[in-house]
Structure formats: C-alpha cells, structure tokens
Image: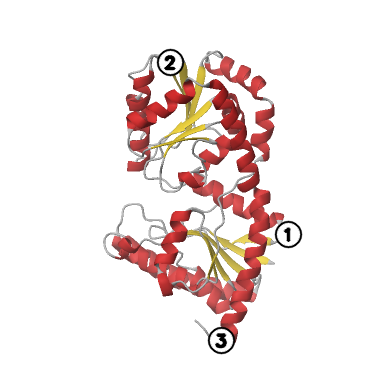
Amino acid sequence: MKIAFYAPMKPPDHPVPSGDRRMGRSFVRVLERLGHDVHLACRLRSYDRKGDQIHQLRLAHTAAKLSQRLSDRLARGWVPDIWFTYHCYHKAPDLLGPTVSERLGIPYVVAEPSFARRRAEGAWAVGQAGSIRALSRADLLLPMTKVDARGLQAAGSRIKGVVQRLPPFLDTSPFRAAAARRFAHRTDIAAAYGLDPSSVWLLTVAMMRDDDAKRSSYLQLADALDRLTHWPWQLLIVGDGPAGTLVRSAFARFDKDRIRFLGTLPEERLPPVYAASDMFVWPALNEAYGMVFLEAQAAGLPVVAGRGIGVADVVLHRRTGLLATGGNAVAFANSVMTLLDEPERRAIMGQAGLRHVERVHSEAAAAHALDAALGLAAARRVRREETGER
C-alpha cells in the first residue's frame, strides 16, 4: 500500500533529536519493512509548547488552506491508500489528516493518540478541539500506553474508530549487538572519558530542554545521588540543550570524578554507551513512556525510574527495573541504592529487560501487530462508506 505519513509534533527528518523523532522514524521503518511505500506527506508542525491560542488559531487557518492544496496535489499524482499520523494530542493536533483522508476517501490512522478531557478549556483549548476532531474521524487509533487507551475510552461516543493498543517499539539489533561486546565497549569508553572500570556506571540519556519535565527530572536525579555519595558510582550524562547551564550547576556539588557530561551523541554512538554502563537512571517526571527506557533494556541495563505516566508500561517493576514514587528523591535514591548493593540482581534484571524488549517492544513484534491493524483500518473505512457514516 501507499502510505502518506505525517507527524504533527516533529517530522522524522527533523534535525533535533528526541524520543518523538525516534518513534516516528521507527514507524516509517516498520511500515517499509511490511512492504509499504511510505512518503512523508507534510512537514507542517502544529506543536505549541507554550499554550498560545493566537498561535493555535493561525496554525489551524494555515492547515485549512494547506490541506485543500495537499488533497488536490495527491489526487493528481501519488494517491495514497492510507493516511497515517503519528502522535496527535492537544499540543500537536493533526490539522491535515481528517480533511485529506475524507477528500481522498482513504482510511485515516492515528498512532499514539491522546485525549485529556481537562484540556477542553484553558491555554490549549483550540489545539484540543483540533485533536478531538481528528480522533473522532479516525478509522483506527493505536494508543501506545494504558493511560492513553483509558483516555480514549473516556471520550465515549466521540471516538468511533477501532481502538487497538500498540506498545512502543524500537530497532533492537544495534543494542543487542552492543550488549554482546559490553566489555570491549566498557574498556573503550573508560579510556575515552577517564572512567574507573571498577566503579558502578550510572547512565542517563535526556535532552536538557528548558521545560519543567526535563529540569525537574535532572534536579531530582542530582538530589537523589547526593544521598549516595558513600557508594562507588560514576554518572554518565548524554544530552545537552538550553537548560545545560542549569543542569551542570545542579551536579557541580559532586566530585569532578563522579560526573561525566558526554554531550549530545549521534544515534549510532548510543548503543555502546548503554551496553558499557551498569544501570540506567532517570526520574521521568511528567513524561510519557520514554524511548530511553526501551533502549536501556534492549542493551541489557536494569532501570531505575520514576513511576511516571507510561513508564510502568515499558519497565516491569522488580523484574526489569525498579519504579520509585514520582517526585520523591528519597524513594528514587533508595531504589538506586538497592541495585548498587546487589550486582547479581542488576545482571538478572538486565537480562530480563533484554528479553522483554525483544518479545514485546521490538520492531518485529510491532510489524506483526501493525500489519493486522492496518487491515482493520481498511475494513473500517469500507463499513463507513457502506453506512454513510461520517
């Protein structure tokens, strides 16, 4: 099938790395793996981080005109069989897919949809209205967390399409290969960054964005580790961004030998860093599932995380990691301390995580589920046409 792919929050070829970009690229890769011809439909970003209703209205106006032109262009040339949108919610509604799919008479699919009733009023009310319009017209909705699936259920009769949960996924092969060469990578990274191979290497991978979620998580991580200075650990931090000065200041309290800032690394250099480390640590305050947790487990690392919005969907508490009460630095420190004291448990959890991701969150697992889901979308479109449902 020919699939028009669209990611309103961030297109998959955007230059700035993020979990959203990684997930978008993974969807394109899996769809192509299934033999589909995937084209990026548009690069229009509808993302509004600040809650500016004037900006949201301008985006809606721009999208209304663009969707008409896009429909006409596609109808004259490369006519898609399906419109596939990745990630649609109040801060980044899909303002194109509903119109284009209706005009072309093709199934409309939304992966990682999110609905929050409380956003009907307030700073993102315009974006919420656009998101609801999109979700109400979709033939197939693929929520990726239990929270999002429950949210769609709460939307009631407004959601008329098929709802099928699809766990987040990634290409496990580079992480599996890196895990097989763990000791070689550990030797290389110890030499490159002046690390002590005999200490426990903690790892976090997170952009230093100037938003409350990332700032709060970094600050809690520093507070938690400040309670554990009697243990022989070193922390590797991969990431950078506008809040870099604040983050470095938060970790300035530690001995210089404790912390290594590795900066932003290209994706191909991440698997060896994961595999060489001993434990992945990240509070994930006010964040969704987080691709980093899948990457860490795919490389064989146990995880210590905050029990965030969707983290429990990807990290199995006491099996592949430990989930601490969100926002509680003491609880987070205690969880890290538990695994610092139990190297055998770390190893067992790491292997369990590797198996779990391969079984549930690999691209192979996603391909099987997605292939069946697209068949449902096509059947749903046929029923709509037969009944005249809009």
Q: Residue at x 67, y 61 (%)?
A: 371
Which numbered disc, 2 or 3, marks the residue that appears first in the sequence?
2
Q: Which residue is mark 3?
A: 387
Neighbor class of circle 2 (other Cα within 10 Å; few <14, some 14-19, many 20+) is few
Q: Secondary structure at mark 2?
A: loop
Q: Amino acid at mark 1?
A: Gly
Measure the alpha-carbon separation of dots 1 and 3: 31 Å
Measure the alpha-carbon separation of dots 2 and 3: 66 Å
Q: Amino acid at mark 2?
A: Trp
Q: Where, by quadrant of the figure, is residue 80 drawn?
A: bottom right
Q: Residue furthest right?
A: 35
Neighbor class of circle 3 (other Cα within 10 Å; few <14, some 14-19, many 20+) is few
Q: Is residue 133 above or below residue 382?
A: above
Quarter of the image with the N terminus in it: bottom right
Colour mode of the rendering: secondary structure
Which numbered disc, 1 or 2, marks the residue that appears first in the sequence?
1
Q: Which residue is mark 2?
A: 231
- Label for residue 35? 1
Residue 2 pos. (x, y %): 67, 66
Q: Residue at x 31, y 65 (%)?
A: 120
Question: Which mark's residue is nearer the viewer, 1 or 3?
Answer: 3
Q: Secondary structure at mark 1?
A: loop
Q: Is residue 148 above or below residue 343?
A: below
Q: Amino acid at mark 3?
A: Thr
Residue 130 pos. (x, y %): 40, 68
Q: Is residue 269 above or below residue 111?
A: above
Give the side of residue 94 with respect to residue 119, left or right.
Answer: right
Q: Secondary structure at mark 3?
A: helix
